[in-house]
Each structure stands twice: as C-alpha cells, then as structure tokens.
Image: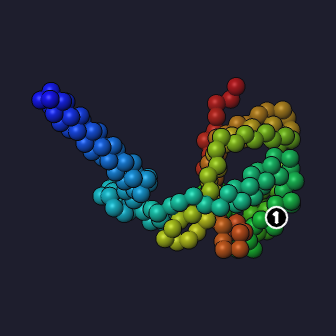
C-alpha cells in the first residue's frame, strides 16, 4: 500500500510538472504571436533617426503589379502604355544626379534613354510593396538587372534598385533609381 501511495505521489508530481511545462510553452508561443516581428525601431535605441520614416508594413501588392507592368513596357519598348501610371507632378532622381519634374519630362527622358538601345532584357530579382505607417505613403521597391544592346551591337548590363512612390490616387508621384554597372563580358 505504501508503494502505491509513493507511486501515486510521483505520478502526480510528474503530471503537474508536465502541465507547468506545457503552460510555459503555450505562454512563449502566445508572446511570439502577439509580439510578431520583434520590437519596432522606435522602441530601440538606433544610432540614427530616419529622415523619411522608420515604421513600415506590407503595402498594396496591386501597386507592385503596376510597377512590374511598367518594367515590361520599358523592356518591350511600349513606354506610352505606362504613361497613365504617372501623376502629372511626378518627380524623379536618376543615378547620374539628374532631377526630372513632371510627367512629360519623365517620359521624354525615359524614351530618350530607351531609344539608345536596340534591345533590352530585364530580369527581376525581387519586389516589395511597403507602406509607411506614420506617413501613410505607399512605395514599391524593385531589384533587378538590365542588359541593353546598343545599335552597334555592344552590350551594357547594370544592376538596378528602384523606389516608386505612389500618391493616394494610385499614381506614381516620385521615383528614385540606383544603378551599378556590371563588368563587361
């Protein structure tokens, strides 16, 4: 009888220990779900303060589709098909320091640059639609490569990073492009 009591006591301790461990696991899982992605940059001591925004979340994926269509229109040399994507007041900063203001200036520069190539091939490495929570501003980020063939047959390849800024009407009102030339092969 005494062995039965000791056995029962040990079993009760094991079960309560198991239940306590299971409860701790559930609490940790719950905290991970509610915390989500960790502390926000505003909760941390960052060495710099963002001049634009430091609070981003996933943006509207439909805007990514618009940007990728514009990339395709550029590649197949049908730039006018994406003209309506641009706001009348669009601004652009290009890698060489050129600043463009207005849809016509943007389209003229784009047509001129695209016209310097006989053929263009684009590849897209990644894209990301984001929204700054504090500014309520949508952006689409795109990374890829462009290989252009000039009329004389020479090729030029570059890595691209672009930031497309959208207004509340879903039109591009800002554009930044960053490039890096790739070694000639």
Which residue is farthest front? Answer: 1
User: In front: 165, or 183?
Assistant: 165
Residue wearing tag 1: 83
Relative to 171, 118 lies left or right? right
- Here the colouring is rainbow
Query: On the picture, is 57 further left or further right than 32?
Result: right
Residue at 53% from the left image edge and 65% from the top image edge: 132
Q: Residue at x 81, y 46 (%)?
A: 75
Element under label 1?
helix
* Location of residue 39 (image quadrant): bottom left
Residue at 40%, 56% in the rendered image? 35
Between 160 and 101, the residue placed more toward the observer is 160
Q: Is residue 137 left or right of residue 53?
A: right
Q: How far across and down, in percent of the image, does residue 115 sit? A: 84, 49
- Viewer-side residue, 117 vs 122: 122
Q: Give the left or right position of residue 52, taking residue 169 as reference.
A: left
Query: Can the viewer see residue 176 in this picture?
Result: no
Q: Is residue 2 above or below residue 30?
A: above
Which quarter of the image is occupied by the C terminus?
top right
Q: Quadrant of residue 58?
A: bottom right
Q: Nearer the viewer, residue 141 or 182?
A: 141
Q: How many marks?
A: 1
- Asked whether the viewer can see residue 122, the reply is yes
User: How crowded is the residue under tag 1: few (<14 C-alpha within 10 Å), some, or many (20+)?
Assistant: some
Determine whether 14 is above or below 25 in the image. above
Give the image location of residue 9, x and y in percent.
Answer: 17, 36
Which residue is at 79% across, 33% downward? Answer: 154
The spot of residue 95 in percent (x, y) is 62, 52
Query: Where is residue 98 drawn, in percent x and y?
Result: 64, 59
Q: Quadrant of the N terminus?
A: top left
């Amino acid at each position: 009888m005494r062995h039965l009591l000791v056995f029962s006591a040990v079993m009760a301790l094991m079960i309560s220990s198991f239940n306590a461990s299971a409860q701790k696991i559930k609490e940790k899982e719950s905290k991970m779900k509610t915390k989500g992605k960790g502390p926000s940059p505003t909760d941390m001591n960052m060495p710099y303060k963002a001049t634009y925004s430091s609070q981003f979340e996933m943006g509207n994926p439909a805007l990514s589709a618009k940007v990728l269509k514009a990339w395709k229109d550029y590649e197949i040399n049908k730039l006018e098909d994406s003209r309506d994507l641009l706001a009348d007041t669009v601004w652009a900063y290009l890698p060489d320091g050129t600043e463009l203001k207005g849809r016509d200036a943007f389209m003229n520069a784009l047509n001129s640059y695209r016209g310097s190539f006989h053929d263009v091939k684009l590849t897209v490495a990644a894209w990301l639609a984001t929204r700054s929570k504090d500014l309520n501003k949508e952006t689409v980020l795109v990374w890829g490569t462009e290989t252009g063939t000039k009329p004389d047959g020479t090729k030029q390849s570059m890595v691209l990073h672009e930031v497309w800024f959208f207004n509340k009407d879903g039109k591009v009102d800002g554009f930044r492009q960053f490039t890096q030339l790739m070694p000639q092969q």
